[in-house]
Each structure stands twice: as C-alpha cells, then as structure tokens.
C-alpha cells in the first residue's frame, strides 16, 4: 500500500476494521473483489456475476447465474405506493435525493423484519433501483408512467431501456456492464463506511443503504462524475480546456474526477473506462469531448501529478450514451449497492458498534453564566 498521511485528518492511513471483500491499492494501484482482479472482472464478467460474487460470496456457476438473472428480472416491478411517492417528487429535484427517498420508501413498504432477509432485500434493491430512478425521471420529465418490468437480461441494458424507451444497443449494454462492475465495490470509502456505521447499530438494511446514498451524493465522492461533466461540457477544444484547467489550478480550485484518497499514482479503473469512452466517442463521431478529456488528463498529470479517478472518463462515456448528466451518480448507486450490502452483511457477521474517540479541542471547564449576565 502506498504511504498515507497519518495526521488523523479524514482517518487517512488508519485501519477502521477488516474486510474480505476488496483490496484497494495493495501494490500501489491494484483493485480486487474477493481476490479477483478488476481487469479480469471488467473483461470477462457480467455485472450480475460480480453482484453474486460480492453478495453470495462466490462466482456463480452458469446454472446459478441464469437463476440469479431470472430472479433479478422478476423483481423489477415497483409497488403502487412507491410509484405514487415518486410521482410527487418534482422534476427539478436532484436524482440522488430521489434515490434516497426511493430506497427509504421501499424500506417502509418492504421492511427488513430480520437479518435472515438480508440477501432477499439486497436482491430486491438491486433489481428495483434502476426502476425507481427511471420511473421518476420519465414521469417527471416526459409525463409517462413507464412499465419497469422489461425482459432485458442485464441490469445495465434494463437501465438504458427504461431511460430511452427502447432496448440498448449491444455496445451500450456492454459499456454499462463494465461501468457497473468498475463501480461495484471499493473497501472503506465514505459511503460504504456510512453503511457499516449504520449496520453496526443493528439497524435495518434500507437505513444503511439510504445513509450510504447520502454520502455518495457529494462531489468529493460519487457526485464527481456529474461535476466532471459540468466542468468539461462547454469546452470546445483541447486548447480551451487547457487554458481553463490552468486557470482553475491557479485559483486553487478542485478539479473533479482527479485524485484519490488511497491510490497514489493511478486508479486502475480509469484505463478501462477511458478505453470504452474512446470507443463510444468513435461510435457517435465525437471530435470534441474525448479530445478535451484527454487534454485535461495530460495537463493535470503534467502540472500536478494528479491522475483521473474512476469518475472522469465515466462522464464522457455516459454522455456518449445519451444519459443526462444528473443521472450519472444514481447509476453509481445502482452498482455500489452491491458493495454496500456485502459490507453490511460482513459488519453484521462480526459486529461491534462503531464508535471512535474524538480529540477535544474546545474550551476548558467554564463557569455557568446566568442568561441575563451574558454578552
Ligand atoms: C468514486 C470516487 O469517489 S473517487 C473520488 C471522486 N472525487 C473527486 O474526483 C473530487 C476531486 N478529488 C478530490 O477532492 C480529492 O482528490 C479526494 C477527495 C478524492 C481525495 O482527497 P484527499 O485524500 O484529501 O487528497 P490528497 O491527500 O491526495 O490531496 C493531496 C493534495 O492534492 C490536492 N488535490 C487532490 N485532489 C485534487 C483535485 N482533484 N484537484 C486539485 N487538487 C487536488 C489536495 O488539495 C491536496 O493539496 P494540499 O496538500 O495543498 O492540501
Ligand atoms: O475509495 C474511495 O475513497 C472512493 C470510492 O468509493 C471509489 O474510488 O470508488
């Protein structure tokens, strides 16, 4: 593992527990899920296989995978009260707030009654989350009540089908599959840690996931893919992008989609999603966004030795597939849900309430001042 600052800020460099789910940056840049390298998973696996790996503890056999896919397909429908709740949320709401509310309402309607239900509840959320966000999006933006029970085999294809009202192309379904795999799990990141803290109080799984969605929403975490898109979308040429980035660095602004709390030299997911972004850019005949993104990457490395994290090239990749920017982070939710739930299971298996100490930096003991004497 690369050397980390240990002054305590952000708990950086400190172990907060153990996990059998994931290694991040173990040899400087690697990423594995239960021992499987991210490159192999992105190249050969279906997202549903990775979900099985994380949630059930092993890669499925073909028969197990077929059964799991069928099961997830059967769980895509939404209960009427949830649809009604989604219809009340205005079009200008942030989709991450919609996800948070959707998860919470589902938890009211299909409450986890005991931890024995954790697998079933996780599968249900995995199947239902794309339906939740797209049901709201299509109702609030297009005025249509979509049928969320499609026959698409993959969760990624299903997501795009609901969004665009037609089955996804093979290329788009493939890229969504890769994207969902890349985002699925990442050890004790902020949102996963949120889920584990919540789980450590023996709370229900919907509360753990709802809290995690709130943590993922911020631009320093999952919200960075949207923030990166907002940053680059108006830049017309690589030269303009370079000028703008240099200006931002001069003003000491954060450049979204760059840097990482754990990786020091590169994020292994970047090369993978970058390659798919390039393919998509050729597919749509783009001669602007991809070259702009590449220049931003080069300038950030040249000027600051800062590298793209998983989010940066996700921005252009999603954009090329016609996904509205504000739905980028909800897709991250649909994927990271697998990691969150697997961590909740792990926390529950060997639980102690998470409750660290704080270093007190406030005033020493003070004498009580009656209210009429205060100034
Ligand atoms: C899926 C994910 O969640 S990946 C992360 C997504 N988030 C982003 O892309 C947001 C932009 N990036 C960042 O804000 C940070 O790099 C984080 C939040 C990811 C990590 O934060 P930290 O662990 O505190 O970063 P780190 O210790 O490596 O920072 C070192 C220095 O580089 C600077 N730096 C780090 N990232 C950036 C950036 N993207 N732009 C400009 N400067 C940066 C920091 O400000 C810090 O400078 P300082 O020493 O003068 O204060
Ligand atoms: O690990 C982190 O700090 C951020 C994260 O979730 C990721 O990079 O996927």
Image: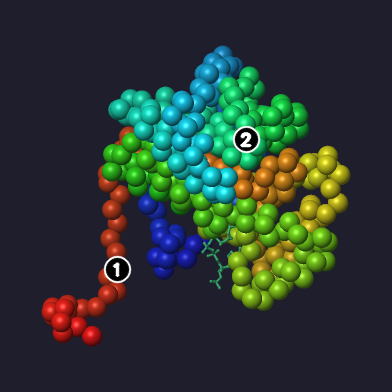
* Residue 82 pos. (x, y %): 46, 31
Alpha carbon separation for disc pair 2 and 1: 53 Å
Q: Observer-nearest residue: 131 or 261?
A: 131
* Residue 284 pos. (x, y %): 83, 42
> As drawn, which residue projects farthest toward the top?
63
Label at residue 72: none
Residue plotted at (41% across, 68% down): 7
Residue plotted at (50% across, 36% down): 86
Kind of element beneath mark 1: loop
In the rendered structure, the answer to whether residue 291 lies left or right of residue 47 reads: right
* Residue 150 pos. (x, y %): 62, 22
Relative to 10, residue 112 above or below: above
Which quadrant is the C terminus positioned in? bottom left
Relative to 34, residue 291 above or below: below
Occupied quadrant, residue 139: top right
**Reading the chain from its start, which is encountered first: label 2 or label 1?**
2
Label at residue 359: 1
Q: Observer-nearest residue: 193 or 22?
A: 193
Q: Observer-nearest residue: 370 or 28?
A: 370
In the rendered structure, the answer to whether residue 13 lies left or right of residue 148 reads: left
Q: Observer-nearest residue: 140 or 345?
A: 140
Q: Which residue is mark 2?
A: 143
Relative to 63, residue 252 above or below: below
- Name the front one of labels 2 and 1: 2
Determine if residue 61 is in view: no
Kind of element beneath mark 2: loop
Residue plotted at (50% across, 49% down): 216
Q: How is the image coloured?
A: rainbow
Relative to 169, residue 314 above or below: below
Determine if residue 304 is in view: yes
Residue plotted at (31% across, 39% down): 203
Callout 2 crowding tier (Cα within 10 Å): few <14, some 14–19, many ≥20: few
């Amino acid at each position: 593992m690369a050397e980390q600052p240990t002054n305590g800020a952000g708990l950086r460099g400190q172990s907060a527990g153990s996990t059998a789910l994931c290694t991040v940056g173990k040899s400087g840049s690697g990423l594995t899920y239960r021992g499987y390298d991210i490159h192999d998973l992105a190249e050969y696996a279906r997202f549903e296989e990775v979900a099985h790996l994380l949630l059930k503890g092993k890669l499925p056999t073909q028969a197990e995978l077929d059964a799991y896919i069928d099961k997830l397909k059967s769980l895509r429908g939404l209960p009427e009260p949830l649809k009604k709740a989604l219809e009340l949320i205005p079009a200008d709401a942030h989709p991450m707030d919609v996800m948070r509310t959707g998860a919470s309402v589902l938890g009211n309607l299909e409450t986890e009654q005991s931890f024995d239900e954790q697998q079933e509840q996780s599968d249900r959320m995995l199947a239902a989350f794309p339906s939740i966000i797209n049901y709201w999006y299509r109702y609030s933006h297009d005025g249509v009540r979509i049928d969320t029970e499609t026959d698409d085999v993959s969760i990624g294809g299903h997501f795009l089908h609901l969004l665009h009202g037609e089955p996804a192309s093979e290329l788009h379904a493939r890229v969504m599959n890769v994207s969902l795999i890349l985002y699925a799990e990442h050890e004790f990141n902020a949102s996963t840690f949120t889920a584990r803290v919540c789980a450590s109080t023996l709370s229900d799984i919907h509360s753990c996931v709802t809290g995690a969605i709130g943590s993922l929403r911020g631009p320093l975490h999952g919200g960075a893919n949207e923030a990166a898109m907002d940053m680059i979308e108006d830049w017309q040429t690589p030269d303009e992008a370079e000028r703008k980035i240099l200006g931002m660095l001069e003003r000491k602004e954060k450049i979204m989609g760059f840097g990482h709390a754990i990786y020091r030299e590169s994020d292994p997911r970047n090369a993978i999603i970058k390659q798919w972004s390039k393919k998509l850019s050729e597919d749509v005949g783009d001669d602007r966004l991809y070259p702009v993104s590449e220049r931003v990457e080069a300038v950030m490395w040249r000027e600051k030795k800062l590298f793209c994290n998983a989010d940066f090239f996700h921005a252009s990749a999603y954009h090329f597939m016609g996904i509205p920017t504000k739905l980028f982070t909800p897709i991250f939710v649909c994927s990271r849900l697998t990691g969150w739930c697997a961590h909740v299971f792990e926390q529950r298996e060997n639980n102690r309430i998470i409750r660290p100490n704080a270093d007190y930096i406030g005033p020493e003991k003070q004498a009580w001042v009656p209210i009429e004497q205060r100034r």
